[in-house]
Image (cartoon, rainbow, N blue to C red):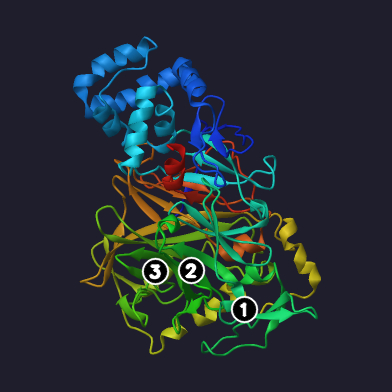
Amino acid sequence: MAIGRKRDESATGEQTTLGRHEGVGEISSSCSGWGAINPERPGHIASNIGVFSSRVARHPRARFFLTGNMGCTISKVFPSFAEKFLKEAKAGKSPELPQDVLMEIFALLEVPDLVRAGSVCSSWRASYISLCKLGGYRQAQTPCLLYTSESAGENVACLYSLAEKRAYKLTMPDPPIRSRYIIGSSHGWIITADERSELHLVNPITGDQINLPTVTTIKPVKPVYDDAGVVHNYEYPCHVGGSSHNWAEPSTYSLRLLRKYIFKKAFLSSDPSMGDYFVALIHYPLAQLSFARAGSDKWTWLPPHTDFMDCLFEDGLLYALNSAGEVHAFDLSAPTVTQKVVLEDVKAYIEENMSFARAPSGDLLQIWRSSATNRDDYDVDQTDGDDSEHGADHENWMDDYVDQTDGDVLQFELDKYEDDLEHGSEHENWRAGDGLKPESDEDEDDDDLEPEPNTDSLVVNTNMIKVFKVDFSAKMLVDINSLGNSVLFLGFNQTLCLNADVYPQLKPNHIYFTEDDSLYLFSCKKNRRDTGVLDLENDTIEPIVSPELWSNWPVPVWLIPNPRKMISASYN
């Protein structure tokens, strides 16, 4: 399926400069903002609430907020109050409403509007505090795009709000965000790899950071010590084909270079601020799985299965999708981890990047995505092993492996290989960068954002996204031509399928996507990123925002802001 691209001149974004005052971590703008929290000094509001309330109440933007977002919410939920509310708001007054009514209204607002509403006047502030203290605020947040900008600085990330169509700046904890790899985004946190190839969880909204177990506990990484007993290199054996135990002699990697070859994608089971959680990690060689539980000091390997591409946590289980469309379920909470195959393989070899998500309807969706390049000479040797078959005709290979029954339902042959480990193993060699050894210390320059040889003019664009509904009883995939009122988010984030009724700022039947090919991304860090919004009805792609606000590194990633700690701190 060919996808056309067009420019959406209306998709503009306003970049808002945000600051941090002494002793206070502030997420705000000259007129409005996300509220404030200082991770080191919780319980402090960004500015004097009386002054801020007065300014907000008088400001034209506040009146727009009162008559716009707030007015619409009231008219929908409490129509009997709507006329009185709008009359007072238009007169420049802070409308008086019963506290219980205000609390129910506030519970429907997203965090930026909630914090602003709580700053309008003392009665609104009281309702805001009561709502937060009682735990009544559970409103879903519209996804935002987290990115960096060269002009913003090394420690600053930017958050583009799809709901507000504006960008905010967030000061991030050390090490600098622009020196990190971003390999995951779940529950409002990102998973990053620093210059020692060590992993961290970071909440961009609060600035909280959690260190994950050291990379040397990931099989088969081994530390190399200098004379002083300090780790200064890693040994990492590459896979050379055949069985999963066929390893090459270990290669030596510098501390920051290892991350380029070992990490694929990471996932969280739940909000880490709640306490107990799991982290799942897809890593090379062979795209294997490891996991760590909160408080653990090591990664636990999940052999012998390989070629995993995406994960999701649901009902206490970890579900993992491999490159053949096979879905595995792991119970990580059991005394001994248990595993079973809940959907057998539906394809024979790797062609696309694959992901999966639970739809609002309850259906499990599989999403297949492929890309095309602007270069006919783009092959394995020029990019540390990216696929020369990117952009191949999807229908040609599909005809060889799929029996098409009635147009909408695709019946796949579900013959399992005798050995699960052979699934795509030969093809996986290049995907994992297996057998590639750093030729010299010049590879250290990968973090200087210099392109790989012969790749600086390379442009990779998504040219096909197919969505299927999994029919477990019939062992079939149903080709979905429309998402209806649902919306998909693809990239290094936890794959999401959301209901546009709950997120009215999102476009139904659209797919919002960012880069998701770790091999290309980590090998061509300086190149333009593949981002956009796909309209499934007419197969065209629009820009997320025009002009693009982000630099090419680190990769822009979707994030659903996690307001838990921000809210609890800001109401104190």
User: Are circles 1 and 2 on residues that touch, CB within 8 Å?
Assistant: no
Instruction: Indicate which label's residue lies in the foreground, 1 or 2.
Output: 2
Which residue is at the front of the view, 565 or 352? 565
Task: Determine the secondary structure under disc 3.
Answer: helix
Q: Distance of mark 1 from mark 3, alpha carbons?
A: 27 Å
From the image, tell me which residue sits under label 3.
398
First in sequence, mark 1 or 3: give its number: 3
Give the x, y percent position of residue 127.
Answer: 33, 30
Mark 1 and mark 3 residues within 8 Å of each other at the beta carbon: no
Residue displayed at 61% across by 32% down: 17
Residue found 51% across the figure and 21% down from its top: 51
Q: Amino acid at mark 1?
A: Asp
Q: Quadrant of the C terminus?
A: top left
Name the image quarter holding the N terminus: bottom left
Label 1 vs label 2: CA separation? 32 Å
Comes first in the chain, label 1 or label 2: 2
Q: Tell me which amino acid carries mark 2.
A: Gly
Q: CA distance from mark 3 to mark 2?
A: 45 Å
For badge 3, the amino acid type reads: Met
94 shown above or below 8:
above
| Comes first in the chain, label 3 or label 2 | 2
* Residue 243 appears in the figure: yes
The residue identified by callout 2 is 295
Disc assigned to residue 555: none
Of 410 and 30, nearer the camera is 30
> Residue under circle 1?
434
